[in-house]
Amino acid sequence: MIKTTDIKLKLAVLQQENGNYEPAMASYLQFLKEKPQDPIINYLVGTIYFQFNDLNNSKKFFDNAITFEPNFSEALNFRGIIYKEWKNLKLAENDFKNAILIRKKFPEALSNLADLYRLKNNFTEARSLINQAIKHNPNLAAAYNNLGVIERDTENFNRARTAFEKALTLDPALHQTELNLALVIDKIGDTASAIELAMKVIINHPQNAHAHNCLGTIYLNQNNLSEAEKSFKKSCSLQSGFAEANNNLGNTLLKKNKVKLALKYFNIALDIDPKNPDFWANKGAAYQAANRPQKAIGACNEALNINPNHTDGRWNRGIAYLLSGDLLRGFSDYETRWQLPEFKSLKRDSILWTGQKLLNKSILVYSEQGFGDTIQFVRYVNKLKQLEPNLVYFETHSALETLVNEIDGIDMVFTRGATLPKTDFHIPLMSLPFIFKTTIHSIPNQVPYLHPPQVPPNIFTKNNSKKFNVGICWKGRVTHRNDSNRSICVKTLFPLFKIPDIQFYSLQLDHDESKILKKYRIIDLSNQITDFNSTALIIKELDLVITVDTALAHLSGALAFECWVLLPFSPDWRWLLKTSSSPWYPSLKLFRQQTTGDWSKLISIVRQALKKKFALNII
């Protein structure tokens, strides 16, 4: 508290402390008429404007206070907070440091400087400063809040929870800390308690935009897009200049395939905070979803201009490059994947191979992602073998072991979890296109490169009638991040099933459509599929395979078998744009949605294509 001997000024300060800001402000302004250069009164006026969130006027009076008293540590600390809010971290750091130089044991300034270093990802210095702040004032609730944020950002969620709870014990009125705690509880996995805590803040403070944004974030984390959208819209309506809420609303709408609306809210967020690289990277993702990769690349470059180390900016740019066919730059940016939370790099005892000489050396190549990714990129083992390593080991999914074991360039196959031999080098499979500098014209697309052995014996026998035999698959794994776009409801395929001269065979695993399959006399082969080798043997007995974007498409392509792939409007990067053929798989034909979510029209096109292929007489 500012010390003063003036009784009237003391009363005004007391009014301010009790929340009676207007009479306090009236008194301060009256004092300023008499003493316009009084640093204390200028400071007090600045603090009230700060309470009103009028940061421009607040800074003006803090500037005055510092001009009239350069060693005014409290004013320097407050002005540093304003600079930090404005994202001018250099000036904020300067003010916090000057405040600490003047008053060495200034816990508030130490805590604020710690949070600034957190924003700069300097967590070591942030921890040191926050510990000093707590040492000098063990009852400073804001310091424990800032400690919690540091622990949260370094993914120590249980320690973050403890720090936030300590802050609330010291000051139960810290509503932002309650929201921070809610988000951390959600991360730990107690979503019900997180929602309950966020709702508590909303009930007590229904006009708190941050509380609605917090609740929306929890819903978004649970993929409850409808409730997330409602919460973010409420937050935006309560605080029109809330950039984060607009950005979150954009992300929610993007997940709902409302791309134009998503772009609208990303633009609003960027109008408010044009130097936020996260917003630019998200805008890039929206442009990619709109099949505008060059626009996506431009937005991501804006993010990288602001922060050259921005992970999402480079990752999203890489996907946009790949989608546009610029594989050289795309696979370079794709190496950023290890910095993303969904990718976990495995520790290996050997040296990471980045192009070193392999003559007479041993190397372990390992699958890092899904079945389709492994099938697509295992082709690069042959290029690796040309470098004359002594031994090439391959670690992969058990379902692919038999099939991969037939590749000449691989000396031994191991399934995940098996004890691996010591090698000189190791390399994740999907880094090989980058190391071999793959372009759209140098893709190793000689097929077939998979050759299934007759183990186990193929027990599948085709229908003996004169009908054409077509395998069908309509959905992928539900855990896939884009499954809601790539998978089809089986009922949408009914126009195909009604074609009289085609016998369809279901290659779909994990389905509950047995009644539908029986109704349309579709032969279900799922009980004969034990791994990808058995699937490959079945495929070779058919006339055609039709599938959505799943591993089945990659398997068919690697076998050089004719396959029609049904793609959503915004496809995975490996299928490029517009083209009906694939540079990765010569035997594949691509059918694309013309508008988001419209599978019916696409199925009509496929129906006509079947008529033409098999010379069928259908209407």
Image (tube, rainbow, N blue to C red):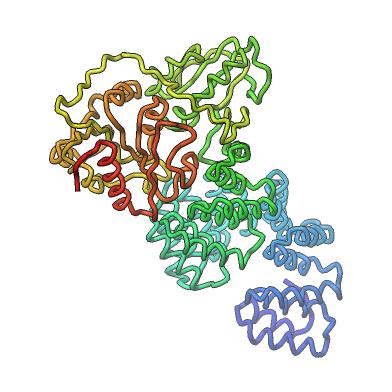
Residue 558 place in picture, x, y as percent: 42, 26
Q: Residue at x 84, y 61 (%)?
A: 102
User: On the rendered structure, is 420 left or right of 525?
Assistant: right
Residue 58 place in picture, x, y as percent: 71, 75
Quadrant that contains the N terminus:
bottom right
As rendered, which of 48 and 87 lies closer to the eye?
87
User: On the rendered structure, is 169 left or right of 125?
Assistant: left
As rendered, which of 46 and 470 lies closer to the eye?
470
Residue 70 place in picture, x, y as percent: 86, 69
Residue 79 place in picture, x, y as percent: 75, 68
Q: Is residue 276 visible?
A: yes
Q: Residue at x 48, y 20 (%)?
A: 395
* Snapshot quadrant of residue 480: top left
Above or below, 560 against 315 in this view is above
Q: How many marks?
A: 0
Above or below, 607 against 141 in this view is above
Q: Residue at x 70, y 58 (%)?
A: 112
Q: Is residue 139 visible?
A: no
